[in-house]
Amino acid sequence: MKKIIYLFIFFFSLVNTDIMAKNLMILKLTYGEVEIELYPEKAPNHVKRFMELSNGGNYDGVVFHRVIEGFMAQTGDVKFGNSNSKSFNLALAGTGGSDLPNLKAEFTDVAHTRGVISAARSADPDSANSQFFICFQSAPHLDRQYSAFGKVIKGMEFIDKIKRGDPNSGAVSNPDKIISIRSK
């Protein structure tokens, strides 16, 4: 009987580890690798979209077009912000998204603290598409106003190295870019 219990525990731990691994992403930057934990139980549609675009290579080469010191680094414009694409236009980066439909807001109890990843959007709460931002510091004014769906759990020091933009607008000339994001 003990062998069966041990086998059950061993099998469950393998299954549980596999489930957890699917919620981890590796963001490669020129500065190093960043590990991101996703929260599918909090924002399932945002996590699904992020994983779909990431694992499909859509974020590869996308620039951090808006980076504000002490606040956040924004990226994810796969239409105009992809430096590997013919449609790349730094002046328009931040105005585009993917060809997929916009997502309905998934406001949660996840606080916008250092390292939190959240969906960027326009004034319409249901306008998030492909863009996202990573908080440099806590931004409680964003809590329950933006759909937070993950957090950097390793490598935040590399996020801290992303080139900052204009102090007023956050616009970045010669911006850093995502090398890749994939499931771990």
Image: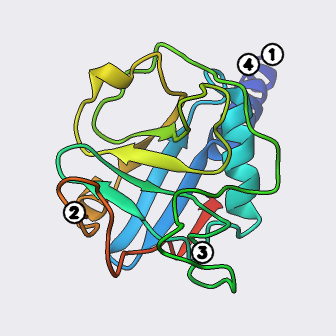
In the displayed structure, does residue 117 sit left or right of residue 104? Answer: left
Query: Disc 2 versus disc 1: distance between alpha carbons?
Result: 66 Å
Circle 4 sits on which residue? 2
- Which of pointers 2 and 4 indicates the residue nearer the eye? 2
Circle 1 sits on which residue? 1
In the displayed structure, does residue 34 sit left or right of residue 137? Answer: right
Q: Is residue 53 above or below residue 28?
A: above
Label 2 packing within 10 angstroms: few (<14), some (14-19), many (20+): few
- Which of pointers 3 and 2 indicates the residue nearer the eye? 2
Residue toward you, 12 or 60: 60
Query: Disc 4 versus disc 3: distance between alpha carbons?
Result: 56 Å
The image shows residue 123 at horizontal and vertical percentages of 53, 30
Whether residues under marks 2 and 4 lie with C-beta atoms below 8 angstroms apart, the answer is no
The image shows residue 67 at horizontal and vertical percentages of 31, 57
Three-letter amino acid code at disc 1? Met
- The quadrant in which the N terminus is found is top right
Q: Residue at x 67, y 27 (%)?
A: 126
Three-letter amino acid code at disc 2? Asp
Counting residues from the start of the chain, the first of labels 2 and 4 encountered is: 4
- Label 1: element kind: loop
